[in-house]
């Protein structure tokens, strides 16, 4: 598979370090970590080492990290766990209307069971304002779940203000953030962020698919989502996926300095915006201060999915709406109140740390070629 | 806003002419722990040590968290450094202290003037600052008896330092000022606590652990390393010697009367620990024994154990109840590890009716059939060494 892959917010190419770690675990370290003998011990040590890497990356301690299968599972566990834990103290859940479906569908279930769910809308730029959070939170709020970075626009949400706002409003709310798009790209410190729970996923940072982790602060006690043999201190039963965990640990260790890398990403984003704008593609839907790895742009007059396939023909791979939506118009852009024409023609470009300026050049060339062909064929 | 850290020295201030030796050892530990966060300037004045970061992005929270593990510090706090005039102090204080003041309900202000030329007297400074804080944070009340937080303003020669409450330090005497000792570490609750308490008095630590594979597992050994790691956070690196003990335990089982098993085992352990310690330059042994806790910890039992030691044995828990020991174990993060259920050698060959009031002569008789010297030599020859960090 060759070409210019610019769909890293959907998934990323596993890095060599992760693949080697997975192979090592499959070939040399395939014991069950719960076994008392040496086979088990060695597998357990491999898991422990990966856990330490993840903990350090977010400023947590090693006993606050629980491995699971993916970001979706983390969101389900955190949200349902928190709501049920505090349901005696209130019944309001505050979230945004632009969360990942893993959050939206889960709070929807809770709404059906009697919880009062308030969805904060973003403004036209894609930002969530602190004021809108203040207006939504009351003393009956038991959970606030807000993603750190939106997967469609890259907008960064004010997660670090949530704890303060909850306190102001006399709310006992637990704070959860879906940091799947932010982990490994923005510097994260759970104490500074003031979050009680944080979701992250491996396949967005060049680890294999099928692995995620949930941070739960040691001061927080929620019931597990999946029960059974008691693995992960009872928080997530099921034999640990040692190869995938090892892959995640290796991918985390392979991350370069986050701040330095963020700077490079910003330069690449600035360059891409410039090149695209110079060629007439200047309807950007991502705010200027969004995570630079994500750039959402509308090519007015051309349908997203058609463009996507034409670009694919030129060897450039991007996303339209989000991958989960499989071709429907983006609900995120809809919530931002953008016009129909913009929503129908939106493309999401997402870089990785391996993307280069030449990728942006090729993207632009491909867009020019695609739009030319489509105009000829009368769209 | 310039932020600095103030360390209040503990017991080491009583050290008279040797004080600066103790201070310097503590400052070395502080430098080692804070250097990775950025360059810092350190200076001392009276019984306070000042730490000033040289760069803006120095991670204060992380520094304050690391200082919790430095012995020699009684208390410490972060202070804001403002120019030495009332106008600036009154203007900056509500800004710096915003987060602190928002989270409390009552406070009082204490002012100290090291610079007697400052135009305002301490009571005046307190009153003025108190007034400004009440204005800015209307939910607050002043309580001079039992406030949630004491706000301190110190007028020194070069600046005024404003700070909220102090964080309790690790106490004790600086690591490295008392010499080196070896702790006999099992996987239980007591020995890690004993190690921590002696490290707190300024000792560098080595450790000795007796392993009896296959009766005991590699997990038991890992548990010991994890326990030492909790202590090493405070004491610095610990050199651990794991001694192969299987042959000795089997020989004791074959040659000695059953009710003397544990006593003889402990006597041999002490002999080995003394030999290893002397070779490493240690001046004492440390154990987690507490009087009466188990059968081998009666007065007489301790007597016969001591009689084979060539080094003094420090037993910091001798007078402690289990409850006190568990409290400290939880405080240093060791308790959850100690209660993991892996067999260590102390529990494997337990006699049904251990002898609780042995006399020295009786022990020697019980040991008769054992050829102790070669057994000890072979055990020492098979030692594996590990360096355990915090």
Image (cartoon, coloured by chain):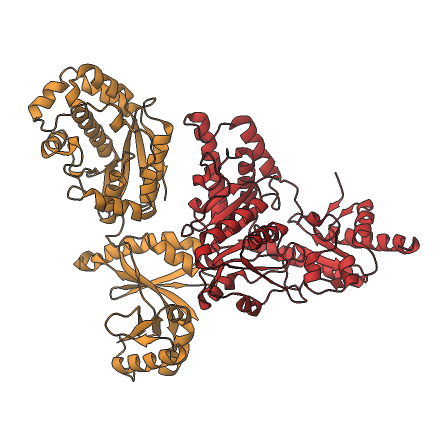
In this view of the protein, can residue A132 be seen by the observer?
yes
Q: Quadrant of the C terminus of chain B?
A: top left
A292 left or right of B33 in image? right
In this view of the protein, can residue B84 be seen by the observer?
no
Q: Chain letter for orange, please.
A: B
> Considering depth in this image, is B45 or A114 the residue closer to the camera?
A114
> Considering depth in this image, is B87 or A209 the residue closer to the camera?
A209
A332 left or right of B74 in image? right
Q: Quadrant of the N terminus of chain B?
A: bottom left
- Residue A164 point in image, percent of width and height: 47, 65
> Considering depth in this image, is A276 or B114 the residue closer to the camera?
A276
> Considering depth in this image, is B372 or A128 the residue closer to the camera?
A128
The residue that appears at 21% across and 14% down in the rendered structure is B254
The residue that appears at 17% across and 17% down in the rendered structure is B256
Name, please, the residue furthest toward the bottom. B119
Total labels drawn: 0
Q: Chain letter for red, please.
A: A
Q: Quadrant of residue A41?
A: top left
- Residue B168 point in image, percent of width and height: 29, 59
Q: Tell me: residue A219, above or below residue A125.
A: above
Q: Tell me: residue A345, above or below residue B275.
A: below
- Residue A224 point in image, percent of width and height: 47, 43
Q: Tell me: residue A25, above or below residue A14.
A: above
The residue that appears at 34% across and 69% down in the rendered structure is B163
């Amino acid at each position: 598979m060759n070409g210019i892959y610019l769909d890293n917010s959907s998934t990323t190419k596993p890095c060599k370090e992760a693949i080697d770690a997975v192979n090592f675990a499959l070939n040399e370290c395939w014991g069950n970590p719960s076994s008392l003998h040496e086979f088990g011990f060695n597998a357990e040590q491999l898991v422990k080492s990966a856990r330490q890497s993840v903990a350090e990356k977010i400023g947590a301690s090693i006993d606050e990290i629980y491995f699971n299968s993916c970001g979706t599972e983390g969101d389900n566990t955190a949200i349902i766990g928190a709501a049920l834990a505090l349901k005696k103290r209130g019944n309001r859940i505050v979230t945004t209307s632009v969360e990942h479906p893993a959050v939206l569908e889960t709070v929807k279930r809770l709404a059906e069971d009697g919880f009062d769910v308030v969805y904060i809308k973003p403004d036209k730029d894609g930002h969530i304002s602190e004021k809108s959070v203040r207006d939504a939170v009351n003393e009956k709020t038991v959970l606030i779940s807000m993603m750190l970075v939106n997967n469609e626009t890259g907008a960064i949400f004010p997660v670090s203000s949530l704890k303060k706002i909850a306190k102001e409003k006399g709310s006992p709310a637990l704070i959860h953030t879906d940091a799947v798009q932010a982990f490994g790209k923005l510097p994260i410190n759970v104490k500074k962020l003031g979050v009680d729970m944080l979701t992250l996923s491996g396949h967005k940072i060049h680890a294999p698919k099928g692995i995620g982790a949930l941070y739960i602060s040691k001061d927080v006690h929620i019931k597990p989502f999946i029960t059974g043999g008691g693995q992960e201190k009872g928080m997530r039963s099921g034999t640990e996926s040692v190869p995938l965990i090892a892959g995640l640990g290796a991918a985390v260790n392979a991350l370069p300095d986050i701040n330095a890398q963020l700077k490079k990403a910003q330069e690449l984003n600035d360059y891409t915006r410039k090149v695209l704008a110079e060629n007439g593609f200047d309807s950007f839907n991502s705010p200027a201060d969004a995570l630079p790895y994500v750039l959402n742009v509308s090519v007015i007059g051309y349908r997203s999915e058609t463009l996507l396939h034409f670009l694919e023909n030129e060897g450039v791979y991007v996303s339209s709406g989000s991958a989960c939506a499989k071709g429907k118009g983006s609900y995120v852009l809809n919530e931002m109140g953008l016009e129909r024409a913009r929503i129908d023609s939106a493309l999401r470009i997402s870089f990785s740390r391996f993307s280069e300026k030449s990728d942006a050049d090729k993207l632009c060339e491909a867009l020019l070629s695609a739009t030319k062909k489509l105009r000829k064929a009368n769209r | 806003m310039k932020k600095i850290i103030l360390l209040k020295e503990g017991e080491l201030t009583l050290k008279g002419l040797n004080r600066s030796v103790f201070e310097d050892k503590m400052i070395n530990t502080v430098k080692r722990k804070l250097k990775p966060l950025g360059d810092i300037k350190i200076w001392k004045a009276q019984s306070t040590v000042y730490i000033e970061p040289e760069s803006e992005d120095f991670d204060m929270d992380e520094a304050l968290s690391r200082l919790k593990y430095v012995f020699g510090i009684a208390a410490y706090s972060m202070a804001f450094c403002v120019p030495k005039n009332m106008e600036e102090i009154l203007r900056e204080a509500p800004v710096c202290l915003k987060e602190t003041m928002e989270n409390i309900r009552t406070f009082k202000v204490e002012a100290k003037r090291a610079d007697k030329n400052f135009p305002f007297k301490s009571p005046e400074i307190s009153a003025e600052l108190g007034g400004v804080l009440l204005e800015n944070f209307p939910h607050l009340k002043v309580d001079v008896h039992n406030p949630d937080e004491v706000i301190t303003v110190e007028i020194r020669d070069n600046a005024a330092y404003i700070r909220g409450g102090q964080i309790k330090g690790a106490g004790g005497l600086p690591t490295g000022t008392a010499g080196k000792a070896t702790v006999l570490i099992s996987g239980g609750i007591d020995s890690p606590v004993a190690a921590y308490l002696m490290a707190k008095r300024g000792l560098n630590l080595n450790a000795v652990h007796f392993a009896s594979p296959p009766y005991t597992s590699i997990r038991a050994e890992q548990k010991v390393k994890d326990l030492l790691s909790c202590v090493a956070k405070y004491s610095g690196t610990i050199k651990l010697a794991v001694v192969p003990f299987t042959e000795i335990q089997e020989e004791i089982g074959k040659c000695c009367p059953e009710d003397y098993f544990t006593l003889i085992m402990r006597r041999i352990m002490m002999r080995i620990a003394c030999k290893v310690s002397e070779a490493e330059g240690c001046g004492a042994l440390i154990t987690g024994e507490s009087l009466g806790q188990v059968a081998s910890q009666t007065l007489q039992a301790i007597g016969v154990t001591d009689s084979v030691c060539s080094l003094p044995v420090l037993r910091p828990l001798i007078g402690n109840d289990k409850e006190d020991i568990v409290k400290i174990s939880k405080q240093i993060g060791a308790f959850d590890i100690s209660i993991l259920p892996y067999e260590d050698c102390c529990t494997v060959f337990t006699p049904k009716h251990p002898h609780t009031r042995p006399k020295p002569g009786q022990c020697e008789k019980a040991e008769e059939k054992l050829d102790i010297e070669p057994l000890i030599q072979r055990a020492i020859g098979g030692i594996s060494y590990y360096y355990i960090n915090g």
